[in-house]
């Protein structure tokens, strides 16, 4: 194995581990929300939606800041800062009241935003296009494995200790990994960052950001990303509550069964990575509208079945929602992971990655409050009907972007890489 191949593998490994702990410390509240609002009763339901929504708002804003900084300063320091601040926020959660928690979790959202755009830049600048897509798959799977671990770990931790132990353990793990990450990445990337910076500075001066936006059709894609964020985080965050209220089940059972979501998401990522080589899915916009249409059908079936109380209907709804969530994660992989790498040649990968991810959490923030209001006043059947409309909007705007984005890809493929 050459030194370069070893270095590339270490870069992917370190980014995967960093993203693993970031998801663990980011999703603690969404996983624990049903426990904290029902059994523990330490936070009111409407306040809980504000806490979760605060993270999505600041995460979305932070993505723009992180994307801008990620193309201009060393990405490894941004990632280290994000991991350590997130560890502190998790440590403070059990120690504050519900209203202070809104502020704490908002800070956590901004800290979490310091990870993805720097990861995009590190991978895009150090790997070829094909290896970049594969590396993104590995890093994204690390996040889903983290979610699976959290869904399994949280009920056990609640049973044996308390909900507070989940946050404390998350803080400790994140702090330890943050220290290991910065020390290792400084060693691995020594000398590489300066060489890449010299190659991209000249291209950045020639390529304006707004020109890249207009020529790629990405403005339409932003709307599709908002729809994807609404669906992805809406289903994932509210599925335990939906399961408890619609089918009258316990919070522990709801959290444990929600592990289906990340499992299905991981499977879907491997499937979409395989078919990404096909002409239809290699174009991220066309792949997205196909997956949105599939989700429309899945949510339509859930709308009909959710009012049926039989066991088979409950299990079928759970599987259908897990599949819909898997489609959203696949769209996320195409539009958030693969698409920004198209801009690596112009040195804009972190900026575009941050802008795309910001749109994700505009939708996610809307889902946290919107789903709470719709489900509380109109019920869960009305909520799943809303999901049908959101998926249809996502499909429509992906189609509107298709022509410009296809032309952009053809032009981008003619540009020599910086590798």
Image: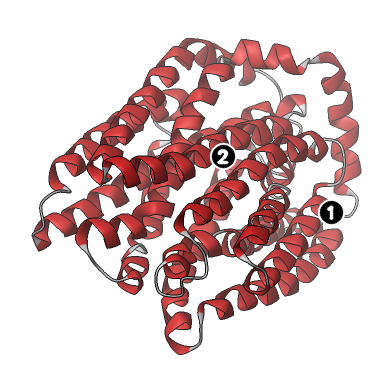
Task: Name the image quarter holding the C terminus.
Answer: top right
**Is residue 271 visible to the viewer in this orientation of the structure?**
no
Residue 347 at what x, y percent from top left? 77, 29
Label 2: how many Cα within 10 Å (few below 14, some 14–19, many 20+):
many
Residue 31 at what x, y percent from top left? 47, 63
Which residue is rendered at x = 50% and y = 24% of the image? 223
Residue 331 at what x, y percent from top left? 44, 37
Q: Nearer the viewer, mark 1 or mark 2?
A: 2
State the residue in front, 236 or 92: 92
Is residue 413 found left or right of 318 in the rendered image?
A: right
- Residue at the bottom extreme, as displayed: 160
Mark 1 element type: helix
Which residue is label 1 attached to? 77
Which residue is label 2 attached to? 361
Residue 290, located in which quarter of the rendered image? top left
Label 1: how many Cα within 10 Å (few below 14, some 14–19, many 20+):
some
State the residue in front, 120 or 294: 294
Mark 2 element type: helix
């Amino acid at each position: 194995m050459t030194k370069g191949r070893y270095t590339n593998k270490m870069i992917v490994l370190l980014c995967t581990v960093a993203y693993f702990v970031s998801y663990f410390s980011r999703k603690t509240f969404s996983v624990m929300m049903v426990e904290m609002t029902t059994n523990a009763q330490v936070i009111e339901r409407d306040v809980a939606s504000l806490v979760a929504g605060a993270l999505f708002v600041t995460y979305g804003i932070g993505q723009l800041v992180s994307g801008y900084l990620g193309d201009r300063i060393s990405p490894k320091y941004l990632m280290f800062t994000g991991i350590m601040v997130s560890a502190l926020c998790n440590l403070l959660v059990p120690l504050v009241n519900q209203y202070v928690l809104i502020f704490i979790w908002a800070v956590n959202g901004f800290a979490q935003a310091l990870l993805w755009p720097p990861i995009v830049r590190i991978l895009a600048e150090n790997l070829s296009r094909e290896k970049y897509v594969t590396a993104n798959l590995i890093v994204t799977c690390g996040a889903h494995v983290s979610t699976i671990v959290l869904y399994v770990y949280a009920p056990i931790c609640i049973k044996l200790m308390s909900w507070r132990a989940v946050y404390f353990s998350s803080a400790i793990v994140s702090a330890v990994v943050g220290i290991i990450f910065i020390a290792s990445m400084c060693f691995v990337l020594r000398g590489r960052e300066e060489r890449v910076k010299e190659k991209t500075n000249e291209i950045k001066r020639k390529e304006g950001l707004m020109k890249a936006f207009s020529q790629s059709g990405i403005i339409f894609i932003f709307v599709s990303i908002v729809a994807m964020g609404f669906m992805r985080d809406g289903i994932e965050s509210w599925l335990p509550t939906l399961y408890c209220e619609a089918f009258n089940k316990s919070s522990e059972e709801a959290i444990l069964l929600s592990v289906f979501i990340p499992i299905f998401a991981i499977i879907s990522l491997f499937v979409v990575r395989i078919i990404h080589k096909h002409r239809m899915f290699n174009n991220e916009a066309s792949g997205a509208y196909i997956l949105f249409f599939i989700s429309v059908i899945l949510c339509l079936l859930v709308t009909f079945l959710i009012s049926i109380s039989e066991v088979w209907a409950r299990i079928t709804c759970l599987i259908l929602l897990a599949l819909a969530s898997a489609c959203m994660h696949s769209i996320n992989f195409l539009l958030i992971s693969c698409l920004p790498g198209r801009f690596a040649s112009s040195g804009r990968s972190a900026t575009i990655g941050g802008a795309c991810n910001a749109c994700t959490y505009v939708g996610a923030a809307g889902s946290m409050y919107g789903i709470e209001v719709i489900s509380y006043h109109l019920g869960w059947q009305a909520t799943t009907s809303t999901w049908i409309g959101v998926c249809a909007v996502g499909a429509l705007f992906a189609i509107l972007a298709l022509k410009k984005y296809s032309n952009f890809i053809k032009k981008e493929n003619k540009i020599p890489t910086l590798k």
